[in-house]
Structure formats: structure tokens, C-alpha cells
Image (spheres, helix red, strand yellow):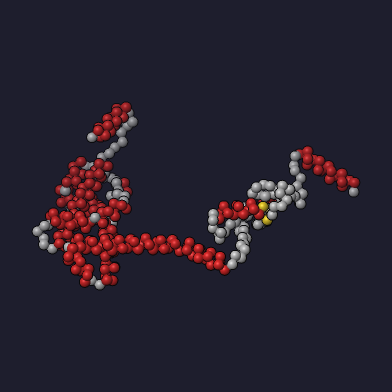
Amino acid sequence: MNSDADQNSQSSSRSESKGVPVISKDSGKYCWVCFASEDEDLDAAWVQPCNCRGTTKWVHQTCLQRWVDEKQKGGNLNKVICPQCQTEYIIVFPNMGILVLMLDTMDSFIYKGCPFMAAGIVVGAVYWCAVTYGAITVMQVIGQKEGLAIMEQADPLVLLIGLPAIPVALLLGKLIRWEDALLSFMRKNINKIPIIRSIPPFRIDIATNTRPQSSTENELPPLSSPVSATRVLCGALLMPTISTFFGKFLFDSVKSNFHRTVLGGLAFIAVKGCLKIYHKQQNYIRQCQRKILDYTESNISTYVRHNNRRQDE
């Protein structure tokens, strides 16, 4: 017995000499939130809320309540898990009566239903705006008296479906990039169809020999420019007004307001498409003719003078 006691005293003295703390199995409680021990507050309530072991096993009830409040952020029904062992805390509430339960259920229903209600309001507002725009477009294209007469005689269901379909059709029509398809066809068949060579931008292309003969399709500059949602929306919604203006300006001799507006719209689309094709082809030629210069003092001075001249203009 004396020899065992001597060995224990020798091992404890060696541990103390190495600076290693000796912790027994019945070590005290330490809160992993405030790092206080049970000796500092004897009246504090302790809880072991998860499967953690060691120093993170115990925590003050009040400290854990504050930590849970921060995690839930006002939502009492949100789940909270331990950041170490990923165990879900078991949170129970006292029975507050049937009235509080009904109020909690109603509050939860309202909280979950408000996003759907708000989405419905937005969709309804957009729908009725589309109906109003469709009615105004009908009166603008056909004529005020004729348009009102047609809408009064039409079936209400047809109006509820047909009128909002007008802005939708205008938006879808605006997304059709027919100019790019035509320009791509003309570029590919410029050597096969002689008449294309007489068109000004393609005649310049052949004269300057700017199109690389050995370039692949992937090396050529892209045809389509980035789509702007606001530009598409404004262009589509202003299309009836522009068509009406072009129809009155170019086809004033046509008696039918509808035919005059349609002809004006087709003329505007054709003129705009030709201008876009010409502009894209000129940008294509300019991009093919670009080159990168040597980084010399003469080129730098020339580049600076050129930029200053452009800014002055």
C-alpha cells in the first residue's frame, strides 16, 4: 500500500513539474457561452442540451436562451442546432391557452400567405395594365369610334384574353432578330449571289478585302448585341404609336386607319432593319480592319493625339 501511494505521489509530482493540469472525472461545470464555472454562480441553472462531451457539455440556461434568441431572430418556431455536434435542441413552450394557440396559428398563416397574396396583387396589376394597354392600342390602330364599337360588341371573355395578349405579342415580336438572320445569310452568300455585292456595305467589304478568308465562323465578330430588357419593353410598347405616326406620314392617302397603321408599321420595321444591318456591317468592317500597334513612343503619341481629337469633337 505504501509503495502504491509513493508511485501516485511521484507521478503527480512529475505531471506538475511538466506543467500538465490534472483534471479529474468529476471536474466542475463550465459554460461554453460565458466561460463561467459553477463556483462563480451557485444559483444558476445548468443544462446539457446536446451530445457534446467535455468542456462544451454544460451551459447556463439563461446564456443558452440568449444564444437561441440570436439564432432564431424572432422566429420562435425555427429549429436551432448545436454548432459542434449538430444536435437539434429540444425546445418546449408552456401551455398558454387556446386563445394564444389560435393567435399563433393565425399569425403563422398570415406570415406564410402574405408572399402569395403580394404576388397575386402584382400579377393582377400587371394583367389589368395589359388589358388597359390593349384597349388603348385597339382604339389607336383601328380608330377611337371603331375600336369602341368593336369592344362593345365583342364577348367579354374574348376581351379578357385578347386585350392582354396584345402587349405580349408585341414583346414576343420584338424578340425576333430577323435582321441578324438576314445579315448572316448575306455574309455567307456574298460570293454566290452577285446582287448582294451591289449593296453599299458589302461592296465596301469586297473593295477593301476586309473579310478574313481563312477565318472560321467562331473567329468572326458576333452578330447579336446584348439584349436590353428595358429597350425591348419600350420598343414593343411604343410600336403601335410609331406605326400610327409612320402610317399618317407615308400613307395618308389610305382611308382605312387600320390598313394605314399596318403599312406604317411594316415600313418602320423595314427601314429600321436596313439601318441596323448597315450599322452592324460597318462595325464588322471596322472590327476586321483593327490592328494592335507596337508599344513605341511614336505610336503612343499618335494614339494620345487621336484620343484628344475625338474628345474635342
Q: Residue at x 62, y 58 (%)?
A: 89
Q: Is residue 294 left or right of residue 16?
A: left
Q: Residue at x 54, y 56 (%)?
A: 74
Q: Residue 182, image x and y in percent?
A: 23, 54
The residue most toward the left is 253
Q: Is residue 143 above or below residue 61?
A: below
Q: Residue 312, image x and y in percent?
A: 25, 33
Q: Residue 244, image x and y in percent?
A: 18, 57
Q: Is residue 114 above or below residue 13?
A: below
Front residue (pair 100, 151): 100
The residue most toward the right is 2
**Quarter of image, res 290:** top left
Front residue (pair 229, 1): 229
User: In which quadrant will I find the C terminus?
Assistant: top left
Q: Residue 167, image x and y in percent?
A: 27, 60
Q: Is residue 137 above or below residue 152?
A: above
Q: Is residue 190 left or right of residue 99?
A: left
Q: Is residue 221 left or right of residue 119?
A: left
